Structures are given as C-alpha cells and as structure tokens.
Image (cartoon, helix red, strand yellow):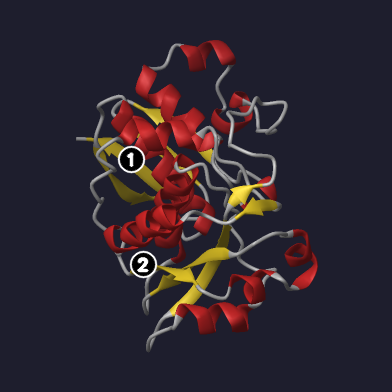
Amino acid sequence: MENFLLHQDKNRWYEAAYRRVSTRRYGGAPTGEQINLLAAMTQTLALGGVRIVLLPNAGKVFGHGLMGRRITGVTHGAGFVLAKDTPDWCAGYVGEAFILECAALDLGTCWMVATFSHKAARAGAGLREGERLLAVTPIGRPEVGTLEPLSDDDRPRKSIPKLTGLSDKDFEDLPEWQREAVLCARSGPSAMNHQPWVFTPEDNGLLLQSDPNSLDTGIAMFHVELAAAVSEKYGRWSPAENGWRFTIS
C-alpha cells in the first residue's frame, strides 16, 4: 500500500497519540459536528483496501460478551472493513489515523477484534461482496471527561532497552527523529498491551520486527511514520525479515 498524505496538521495527530487511551466507560455521545467530521474522515481514509464505516447500531455491537459488558454508555462506533485479499496490517495503519482523529476531537475509542457482537457489527457495516470486518471501536465522550497525556506510571510500557536492545544512554544518542519514532510507537495500543514490537535503528531508517501482517504492526507503523513526519523526515515502508523497514527518502 502506498503511503497516504498525513493530516495537514500532523502535529495535531502526534499530540493526540500521547493522549489517546483505550476507553471503556463513556459519559456522552459525540456531537453532531464531531460525527460530521468523522464521517468526512472515513472518506479521506478510504485507502489501500480499507473502509471505515460509522456503526448506527453501537448498542447492539458492544453490549455483548465479557469485555462488551464493560463497555458502557456507548452510542456510537466504527468498524474497520477490509476488501478481499487486503492484509490485516493495513487496517491498523489506516485505522489508527482515524483513532487519532477521534482523540484529537477529545473522543474516546478502544480497538476491539474479538469481544463484541460480530453479527451486529457486520450488519451495521453493510459488508460488500468479498469484504470482511476485522475490528471495531466504540466512540464517545469519556466518562472521566477530556483526554489528558498519561505518564508511564498511568500507561505501563516496555522499557526502551526491551524495545530496542539499546541502553538508555545509547538511545539518547540516536538522531531525534528515531527517538521520537520509537517513543511514539511505544505509546500506541496493542492487543492486551503486549507491545509485540522490536525496533532497531539503522543508518537511514528504522527496522520494525513484529508479525508483519498483524493489526498491532500496522498501528506501530503509522506511529513511526507520524513521528518521523513531525521531525520533517519522510520515507517508505518495505518488507523485511520478520517485519518492516522504514527508510527515509
């Protein structure tokens, strides 16, 4: 999939990456203006075989299963739909842009791939021939109020040495864009918060080792690219052994 042009205000999404948190308790619905903005964003992000659709039946979608019962106060949601033969990572890469747009609007979200009503979600998504629904997210105003940046104590993350194999000192000696790319990817969501990534800085890029076709990998790829763009570094992803390589143009 070709890289898509990042949001015209990339700093807005970058800041949102550090405020986004998986939200399971909601205190209100998005405003009509917010829904209109998100509907427009689904058209902007109709890329690479990925289609994002707002779900009109969120109550039925999320009121299901153990995790679903803990998703409360939901009135709106979105589904991430893949065209035939589109790999899973594409949904993470494109879908995370949508998730960060929600966060920039102070709306909570929560990536979900299993514990929701798949039947209701597929019906709400209006699947076309050959399409499959990979994941969904609730959307709404968090019960606690506005989203705020979280510390590592509030949002536990793997240490830099575990993620990179580098000492803290060696990490600090990296070029700024590489440090920011790793830190931004580190802030991203992953299934059960496992953070299944290893980042290896290279002379002109960054090697991301993870399941090359997972939703989590696509999310990390987008975070890396976003942080690089904030540092005015642009490049391309290419397949690598056990993952992907981001090379600066």
Look at 55% across and 64% down and name the residue there: 76
Residue located at (19% from left, 35% from top): 249
Q: Element under label 1?
A: strand
Answer with left or right where residue 147 lies relative to residue 115: left
Within 10 Å of disc 1 (Cα), the crowding (few <14, some 14-19, many 20+) is many
Q: Nearer the viewer, residue 208 or 148?
A: 148
Residue 244's spot in the image, x, y percent? 39, 48
Place of residue 176 in the rendered image (x, y in percent of width and height, measured from the top left): 38, 18
Q: Secondary structure at mark 2?
A: strand
- The answer for how far apart the CA atoms under marks 1 and 2 are is 21 Å
Residue 153, percent from left and from top: 72, 26
Query: Which residue is denoted by mark 1 in the rendering?
Result: 246
What type is the residue that disc 1 sits on?
A: Phe
* Residue at the bottom extreme, as displayed: 129
Of residues 239 and 30, which is closer to you in this image? 30
Q: Nearer the viewer, residue 4 or 200?
A: 4
x and y, in percent, of residue 80 in the image? 46, 67
Q: Residues within 10 Å of mark 2 (few under 14, many from 20)?
A: many
Residue drawn at 24 percent across, 39 percent down = 8
The amino acid pointed to by label 2 is Val
Q: Which residue is mark 2?
A: 50
